[in-house]
Image (cartoon, rainbow, N blue to C red):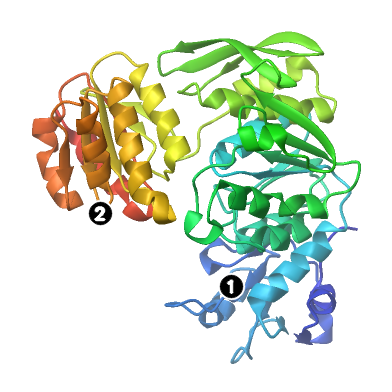
Amino acid sequence: MKYLTPQKIAEATGGEYVGSESTRNTRVDGAVRDNREVKPGNLFVCIQGARVDGHDYANSAITAGAACCLAEHSIQDAKGPYVLVESTQAAIKSLAKYYRSLFSIPVIGITGSVGKTTAKEMVAAALKSRFDVLKTPENLNNELGVSLTLLSMSERHEAAVVEMGISEFGEMSRLADMVRPDICVMTRIGYAHLESLGDLNGVLRAKSEVFSFMKPDGAAILNGDDELLREFDPGIRKITFGLNERSDIRAENIRADGTASVSCDVVSGAGRFPIVIPAYGAHMVPAALTAVAAGRLLGLSDREMALGIRSYLPVGGRSNISRTGFITLIDDCYNANPNSLRAALKSLASLPGRHVAVLGDMLELGEASDALHRELGVFAAQSGIDSLVCCGDKATHLFDGYLSAGGKGPRCFSEKDELIAALPELIKKDDAVLVKASHGMKFEEILPALRELGRG
């Protein structure tokens, strides 16, 4: 049976079991770090944070049904069993690695500088047409999030899709040591985390650490439109996807139905078949191609893949479209880097009406930051963006680039409150409005004001 017990957790983590003999072999299913999310049978992981100490909530978690806790120090008046370890952060990774080793189902790892979460959701949607699929919830792609995802695997699952995000060298090795993917999807090598990774070649080196943890019969699904990935040798079977003719799996006849969907023909050596992606933006097409590549490796038919892709649902804060009755609002404010912003601007420019881009800083771009922001300002003007509204320390470079390329009447604000106050004069009825910035800019705070426009 593929499940954990407090005794097994102690053995896998090198920890000490603390509790009665009657609970030593109690079944443990899944793991959480928030006592409000506890379900009966869960392992509650006590994390010492900057403001909150999970140990303070251990007994609340036991009362809510947790079968066991993982702790770094003794739990006062413990209401249930716990495993005492030196570091819960380290122990949860050891436990996830052990638990993953109990399963032989195909595991697809998703990484890249941009589009990881979209590709993860698309691959999972395609595979669900045949399999019971475990996938990373939301974008919990760091070491703790990946650990919790793996520990939620159960005997009913027939495949797993795990998103892996990194920001420094060595981090992918720690993730891949747990995940041990059979298939790895790499979406794109882009301008992200350059402060620690240096340049695009550094990004590729950091991401490609994953291939050292894959079996010789594994497969790498790489973006054939990305120059670095197109030429890269992962040391295992390589399948490329993209829009150029040299890609193994490519898209032709891409057609957008406004904000409702994007359709195309998928072409490969196996033939041609049509797909419809129920989401906004041509940048969704490469994600769908990753789903086709993974599906083919796992034996899905064209019909199964097309049906699965048709069931795709966008994740919050990523190209979510809403019509407020006054404007068409594109909520893409979860994150931003030069690659994703370029794609978002192209998709915005394809919509009817006046195109307004409300943009903020792209963070962690290192020494290239100013130049990259200016370059994207130029691109916005050249793409046909009718109005640029920006805010942030680096947004001045977006502003300058847009203006230098002939963009008309851009506005740049130092504070979000000032931007929000100016929206009624900047946004017109029937505008298509994109909101995008790095997550740390908290541009979701702008959305309520945009939704209220025209209702006064």
**Quadrant position of the C terminus in the picture:** top left
At 26% from the left edge and 44% from the top edge, which residue is drawn? Answer: 397
Lateral position of residue 56 relative to residue 405, left or right: right
Q: Nearer the viewer, mark 2 or mark 1?
A: 2
What amino acid type is highlighted by mark number 1? Ala
Q: Residue under circle 1?
A: 61
Quadrant, the N terminus: bottom right
Residue 154 as seen in the image, left or right of residue 88: right
Residue that badge 2 annotates: 393
SS for dot 2: loop
Residue closer to the observer: 205 or 152: 205
Residue 25 point in image, percent of width and height: 85, 74
Amino acid type at image mark 2: Asp
Q: Residues within 10 Å of mark 2 (few under 14, many from 20)?
A: some
Q: Nearer the viewer, residue 415 or 21?
A: 415
Q: Closer to the camera, 126 or 79?
A: 126
Marks 2/1 in contact by CB < 8 Å: the verdict is: no
Q: Position of residue 423 (x, y in %)?
A: 14, 36
Considering depth in this image, is 255 or 304 the residue closer to the camera? 255
Residue 373 visible to the viewer: yes
Seen at 64% across and 74% down, the residue is: 89
Q: Few, some or many C-alpha atoms within 10 Å of disc 1 (few <14, some 14-19, many ≥20)?
A: many
Corner quadrant of residue 20: bottom right
* N-term-proximal mark, 2 vs 1: 1
> Residue 129, can we see it?
no
Can you give x and y, in whole percent of width and height, for residue 271 in the image? 78, 9
